[in-house]
Image (cartoon, rainbow, N blue to C red):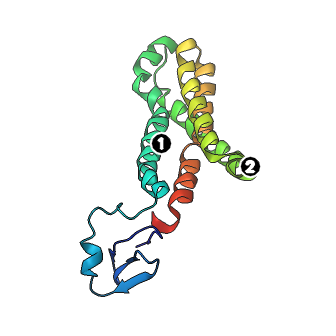
Amino acid sequence: VYCSPHLTRETPSPIGYRGWNSAGALVSSRQPDKNLVAAGNWRDGMPETARMRWWILPAIVVGQLLATSTWFAANAVIDSLQVLWAMEGGEGLLTTAVQLGFIAGTLVFAVGGVADRFHPGNVFLASAATGAAANAAVLIAPGDFTLVLAARFVVGFSLAGVYPVGMKIAAGWYGGGL
């Protein structure tokens, strides 16, 4: 169990109880220190900045859930799109376009070091907004199969700036504690 330097109470770990006491010393034992365990709320002794960051992981999770939902959004309306295209099938092509876009985006983001060159939060936001816009582009010309495939590719490309970058943000905030 990763121990934040801001904890004032012990936390259980596979090797016993570990944590930082109020004097800043690492406490590690097989038995919990009753004074530290009885300290009350786990955030009581934390500095204000550490108390404020508890919500960051849930915010990242919700942001990723909402942004990555665009991956399968076109599959929800595939029946209507098939009628417009006057064709059977097509869902495989839409899904493949997203996957190819994700692979291409991951390659570009990794080779270009995008999340290292720019603030990861800005990359996450811009990627999520781009994915949402590309997803909405299907509404502009749903009858144009080529445009829909291109929009789905852009959705996949933008998701490369959502999921991996979100994990980078989480790792930066929580270090080894995830």
Mark 2 lies on residue: 117
* Circle 2: residue type: Arg
**View extreme (bottom): residue:** 30
Q: Position of residue 107 (x, y in %)?
A: 69, 49
Q: Is residue 138 left or right of residue 31?
A: right
Is residue 16 visible in this depiction of the protein? yes
Q: Between residue 132 and residue 144, name the one nearer to us.
A: 132
Question: Residue shown at 48%/38% (left/top)?
Answer: 68
Q: Position of residue 30 (x, y in %)?
A: 30, 88
Q: Give the SS element for disc 2.
A: helix
Q: Between residue 101 and residue 31, name the one nearer to us.
A: 31
Vertical placement of 162 versus 147: above or below?
below
Query: Would you call the spot at circle 1 few (<14 residues within 10 Å), some (14-19), or many (20 or more)?
Result: many
* Circle 1: residue type: Gln
Q: Is residue 31 left or right of residue 46?
A: left
Query: Would you call the spot at circle 2 few (<14 residues within 10 Å), some (14-19), or many (20 or more)?
Result: few
Q: Quadrant of the N terminus?
A: bottom left
Task: Give the number of the mark in front: 1 or 2.
Answer: 2
Q: Quadrant of the C terminus?
A: bottom left
Q: Between residue 21 and residue 80, name the one nearer to us.
A: 21
Question: Residue shown at 53%/20% (left/top)?
Answer: 136
Quadrant of res 144: top right
Q: Position of residue 166 (x, y in %)?
A: 54, 48
Mark 1 lies on residue: 64
